[in-house]
Amino acid sequence: MSSAALSNLRVLDLTRVRAGPTCCRILADFGADVIKVEAPAGVDPNAKMSGERHGYDMLNLHRNKRSLTLNLKKPEGRALFLRLVRGADVVVENFRPDVKERLGIAYDDLKAENPRVILASISGFGQSGPYRMRAGFDQIAQGMGGLMGVTGLPGQGPVRAGIAVADSTAGIYAACGILVALAERERSGEGQWLHTSLLESMIAMMDFQAARYLIDGEVPGQAGNDHPYSTPMGVVETADGHINIAVGGESQWAPFCRAIERPELAEDERFATQADRFANRPVLTALLKDIFVAKRSEDWLAILEGHGVPCGPINGIDAVFADPQVRHLGVARPLTHRARGPIEVVATPITMSRTPSSIRTPSPDPGEHTDQILGEAGLSTGEIGDLRAKGAI
């Protein structure tokens, strides 16, 4: 069943790779008619940057969308795009800042066709400034935004996160901005241009680490698996692996000491407060190491949970999707793809009481819906054929 939340919206999706497609996927999952506008075969030399069409990444990123092929470098293609803008609510693009200007599809061009349209732009480093023309990639943003400087073991050297944090976050922030612009449009009747970047989004995700520097002047370094200021909180080795523990405050310290059968540690002046435990972290870590290697992970998790101490396993991705809570939440959703058959994709992690997200259709093939979309825009079969003959679609 299709979600009704955004079913009144039409989105023209000019994006590729990850940040932009993530933004548009959120809108599509809540029912928006997202039209993936892409170049005809052979026009874009960077088409493979987004991965194989029937590969796992494309199948997860582009579900619920329709596909239209359109050559924006052709005058007929640009004219057709602007015609589509007249009936659109949102346009999303993640070109380098000068590209939309060169193609004649910058915000002022779109606004002239449709004053209510909202343009969302995602770039590597922003729409202005000394780095505006640089190509943006997730790992570069992770490094420049500070994440790689606080990730990894002390002295190890910079370490990237295992997921595309900057890309995905920029897409989420862009979707948030679009929803704000749509809400404001209800009052003003006007669209607007919003933009974010991988660099800005990455710095925003640094959150308390960034505030630590801005407010207190401290430059955080690598802390490995230890929490920056709370302890014991992090990874401990067990007899058969590792688990996470999180003793986040004074109310959890005494139960934790009882759980590990060392109640006297709760009265030890070296560990009396969180500040004391942090100051004596090396001593406490050494004590806990000898204790936790005596039992298996499964046993420790049961013991700690029994005492109300936050803890959890450290899962490989296969164990993640086998977890009973993950199964209960329905994070993996079934879908049937014409080439790959039955597959599962990752659900949008928002639960709505009346208008939930839905996963309805698989990632489209390039141009799969071109004739359908142009027919809806009022073009005749002959006009569509003429555009195809001219290489505009």
Image (cartoon, rainbow, N blue to C red):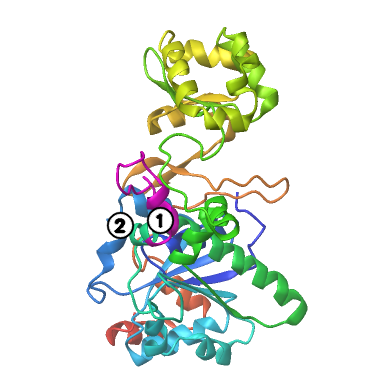
Expressed as whole percent of the image width and height from the top left, the position of residue 258 reads 62, 10
**Residue 154 among magenta residues:** yes
Whole-percent x and y of residue 353? 72, 45
Q: Is residue 72 above or below residue 249?
A: below
Q: Magenta residues: mostly which secondary structure?
A: loop
Placement of 127 over or under 353, stated as above or below: below
For image coordinates 50% across by 13% down, the residue present is 300
Q: Magenta span covers which residues?
A: 144-166
List the residue tagged with mark 1. 363
Residue 38 falls left or right of residue 118: left
Horizontally, is 391 left or right of 176 in the view?
A: left
C-alpha gap between disc 1 and disc 2: 8 Å
Vertically, is 292 above or below 139? Answer: above
Determine the image quadrant of residue 272: top right
Residue 309 makes an appearance in the image: no
Image: 335 above or below 218: above
Asked whether the beta carbons under mark 1 and mark 2 sit within 8 Å of each other, the answer is yes
**Identity of the amino acid at label 2?**
Arg
Q: Give the label on residue 154, or none.
A: none
Identity of the residue drawn at 40% across and 69% down: 124
SS class, disc 2: loop
Q: Nearer the viewer, residue 154 or 161?
A: 154
Q: Residue at x 47, y 49 (%)?
A: 220
The residue that mark 2 highlights is: 53
